[in-house]
Image (spheres, rainbow, N blue to C red):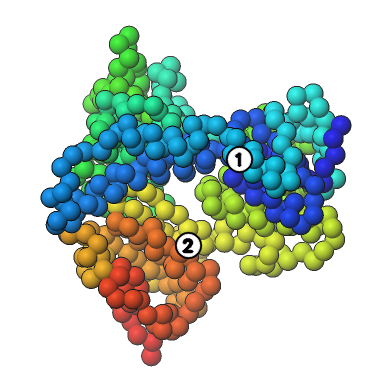
């Protein structure tokens, strides 16, 4: 039996942050991992997918400028892109991440953890107990849609979609969300003939124009985007080719099929039933990430189903790690909105970038979601291509931005940018939303000219000067 103050189950980026922030406050911490230290983001999600996308973005940007367009005479070197991707995953070895844990003073326990009772886990026959808390940070798993024949066809999931060692001749992507659109963009840029099918439009849950502009650009780049259709059967033949039948009566024949239609909680084999919770469920938490009905169990990141984004999970982790320490040590706990020990931003101020081409950068509430919450809002839009900075960034720049304003408080509650290179503009919008900066004050935040940030002035002008 080994005792710690805190035991963290899951050594991904979120789990590492829970452990680190609690340890910095004086707690002894062990972190348990059954796979690679560093987790999904490091090896099969954020980092490798963005590495696959970046070279294509750079090439496309060069082709949009007179002068550099003439200098670009070839296509991407797919082998070099894949090698660069692999370098970001350290060839799927976690030595560097393990060294970081050691340097931070956090013990690593290799193996599969199961909760056996309050503050108690078992890893490969060894029992470990926690004096303060256990944190479940096991993330989510790729969900395979229920399509006849799909499982037998050995489809790619998001892991295979980011770790493949070669470029398929052709690829069908099922799903029009963030993962589906990003991976379709990446593999098309590397030379695969890509078809994407989606039940509805692309990027549901975002402002409607975001999915529309991305779909238009994907089609222009050669991707066959089909919306409003579903696969009804998938078959892989003896030659390895995959035939997918769609509900509009058409078929698509490809080398590979990738399913990117959602995530499920990674909680099926954690022993949750031993403490009265349901195995395989998402874990409901308060704003300190304390699991409802307990005083010792925390759930951080994807597993609590609040916001399935790595950076938002790490934000939760910073709050949770320090909240665990404060409760255990009896120091003041700040749980008021925007307090040090809560993840208030999860509710209406989470930023997200979709790294398609064009990029989609958004924070806060869409107009529709704001209205659903009962807010009295007004939304204004402006074409990014009409901004001098955007015209300099790319010839024929295409993009759009919108701003959602809470009319009663006079503050921005949501922003969406769609266009080349908009990702780096998002933090200013996030600060405006989180800080609830009054529109009257935003008029005094002068955007440098000629940059794309001039969009702020144009949106304010469209909204109207204060009286």
**Residue 364: mark in rendering:** 2
Q: Is mark 1 on a helix, strand or loop?
A: helix
* Residue highlighted by disc 1: 97
Instruction: Tell me which residue sits at (35%, 76%) in the image.
Output: 447
Q: Are marks 2 and 1 in contact (CB under 8 Å)?
A: no
Q: What element carries label 2?
A: strand
Report how far apart the C-alphas of labels 2 and 1 lie in the structure.
Answer: 32 Å
Instruction: Tell me which residue sits at (30%, 17%) in the image.
Output: 241
**Residue 17: mark in rendering:** none
Residue 244 appears in view: no
Residue at the limit of the structure toward the bottom, as seen here: 467
Q: In the depicted view, which residue is nearer to us: 292 or 67?
A: 67
195 is higher (above) or lower (below) than 14:
above
Q: In the depicted view, which residue is nearer to us: 259 or 10?
A: 10
Mark with earlier residue (2, 1): 1
Q: Is residue 444 left or right of residue 436?
A: left
239 is higher (above) or lower (below) than 224:
above
7 is higher (above) or lower (below) than 349:
above
Q: In the depicted view, which residue is nearer to us: 292 or 48?
A: 48
Instruction: Tell me which residue sits at (61%, 47%) in the image.
Output: 14
Residue 195 rendering spot, x and y as whole percentages: 27, 33
Residue 203 appears in view: yes
**Corner quadrant of residue 82:** top left
Give the label, 2 or 1, closer to the camera. Answer: 1
Q: In the depicted view, which residue is nearer to us: 169 or 352?
A: 169
Residue 173 rendering spot, x and y as whole percentages: 34, 33
Residue 449 rendering spot, x and y as whole percentages: 29, 76
427 is higher (above) or lower (below) than 113:
below
**Corner quadrant of residue 259:** top left
Q: Quadrant of the N terminus?
A: top right
Q: In which quarter of the image is the C terminus?
A: bottom left
């Amino acid at each position: 039996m080994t005792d710690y103050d805190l035991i963290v189950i899951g050594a991904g980026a979120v789990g590492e942050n829970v452990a680190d922030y609690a340890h910095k406050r004086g707690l002894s911490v062990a972190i348990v991992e059954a796979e690679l230290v560093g987790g999904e983001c490091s090896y099969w999600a954020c980092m490798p997918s963005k590495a696959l996308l970046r070279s294509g973005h750079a090439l496309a940007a060069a082709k949009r400028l007179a002068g550099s367009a003439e200098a670009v005479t070839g296509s991407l070197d797919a082998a070099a892109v894949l090698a660069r991707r692999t370098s970001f995953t350290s060839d799927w070895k976690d030595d560097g991440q393990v060294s970081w844990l050691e340097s931070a003073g956090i013990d690593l326990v290799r193996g599969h953890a199961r909760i056996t009772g309050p503050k108690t886990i078992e890893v490969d026959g060894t029992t470990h107990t926690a004096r303060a808390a256990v944190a479940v940070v096991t993330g989510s798993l790729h969900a395979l849609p229920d399509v006849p024949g799909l499982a037998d066809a050995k489809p790619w999931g998001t892991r295979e979609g980011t770790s493949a060692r070669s470029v398929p001749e052709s690829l069908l992507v099922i799903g029009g969300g963030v993962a589906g659109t990003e991976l379709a963009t990446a593999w098309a840029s590397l030379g695969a003939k890509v078809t994407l099918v989606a039940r509805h439009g692309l990027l549901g849950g975002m402002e409607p124009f975001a999915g529309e502009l991305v779909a238009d650009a994907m089609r222009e780049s050669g991707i066959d985007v089909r919306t409003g259709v579903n696969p009804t059967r998938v078959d892989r033949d003896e030659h390895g080719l995959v035939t997918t039948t769609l509900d509009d009566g058409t078929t698509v024949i490809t080398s590979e099929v990738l399913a990117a239609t959602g995530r499920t909680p990674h909680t099926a084999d954690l022993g949750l039933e031993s403490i009265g919770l349901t195995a395989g469920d998402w874990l409901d938490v308060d704003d300190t990430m304390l699991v409802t009905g307990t005083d010792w169990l925390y759930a951080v990141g994807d597993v609590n189903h609040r916001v399935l984004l790595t950076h938002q999970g790490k934000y939760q982790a910073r709050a949770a790690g320090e909240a665990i320490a404060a409760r255990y040590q009896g120091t003041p706990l700040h749980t008021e909105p925007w307090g040090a020990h809560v993840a208030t931003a999860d509710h209406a101020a989470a930023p997200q970038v979709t790294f398609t081409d064009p990029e989609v950068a958004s924070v806060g509430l869409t107009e529709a979601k704001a209205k659903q919450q009962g807010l009295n809002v007004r939304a204004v839009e402006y074409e990014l291509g009409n901004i001098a900075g955007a015209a300099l960034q790319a010839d024929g720049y295409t993009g759009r931005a919108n701003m959602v304003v809470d009319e009663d408080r006079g503050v921005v509650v949501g922003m969406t940018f769609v266009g080349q290179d908009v990702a780096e503009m998002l933090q200013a919008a996030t600060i405006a939303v989180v800080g609830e900066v009054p529109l009257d004050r935003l008029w005094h935040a002068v955007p440098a000219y000629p940059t794309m940030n001039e969009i702020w002035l144009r949106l304010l002008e469209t909204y109207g000067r204060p009286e």
